[in-house]
Amino acid sequence: MPNFVDPSPPGQCIFCRIVSGEIPAAKVYEDALTIAFMDIGQVNPGHVLVASKRHAVTLLDLTTEECAAVMQTAQRIAQAIGREFDPPGLTLLQANGPEGGQTVFHFHMHVVPRYAEDGVGLLWPRKEPPVAVLQDYAARLRDKLGT
Ligand SMILES: [Zn+2]
């Protein structure tokens, strides 16, 4: 997980200042709703961040349009990474809230080229509950989907 934490208040955060051009970034792409720039941490060469231009903290704060735009930009960046760096794997990582691993509280998605034994890790403690429990979770979520 990234260990940089941006303590800036909303609207003055480091990504808002990159969007406004107040601080420099190695920009890769931008459109009306999104911006993509190199992550200063560079877990692997070609590691890019795709952020919403508007200050939104988490996935839940994005509009439907922004959600679609972010994924479209992530795919374009992934294609460019494939053409230039040709990694055997690629990981998208999008963290929400401190418990979810978010360290800069302006929505962003990591597009990370991946290689065998590259040291990137995410613990994934499988619980494998009974099917009835899965059905219960699914029913509860279906009930909350809305229209
Ligand atoms: Zn911001």
Image: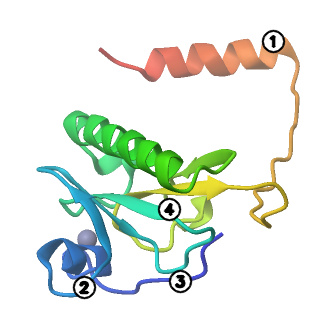
Front residue of this view, candidates 111 and 6: 111
- Residue named by callout 1: 132
Q: Position of residue 96 (x, y in %)?
A: 49, 56
- The amino acid sitting under disc 4 is Gly
Give the class, few, some or many, for how many residues have Cα within 10 Å of label 1's Cα (few <14, many ≥20): few
Label 3 or label 4, whichever comes before in sequence order: 3
Q: Residue at x 32, y 76 (%)?
A: 26
Element under disc 3 = loop
Q: Are marks 2 and 4 in contact (CB under 8 Å)?
A: no
- State which mark lies toward you, 2 or 3: 2
Q: Position of residue 23 (x, y in %)?
A: 22, 87
Label 3 or label 1, whichever comes before in sequence order: 3
Horizontal relation, residue 3 to residue 121: left or right: left
- Residue named by callout 2: 24
Task: Give the alpha-carbon distance from disc 2 to disc 4, as whole Å.
Answer: 26 Å
Task: Give the alpha-carbon distance from disc 1 to disc 2, as whole Å.
Answer: 52 Å
Which quadrant would residue 37 be assigned to in this image?
bottom left
- The amino acid sitting under disc 3 is Phe
- The amino acid sitting under disc 2 is Pro
Label 2 or label 3, whichever comes before in sequence order: 3
- Residue named by callout 4: 97
Please state, as top left, top right, bottom left or bottom right, where the N terminus lies in the image.
bottom right
Q: Are marks 2 and 3 in contact (CB under 8 Å)?
A: no
Mark 3 CB lies closer than 8 A to ligand 1: no
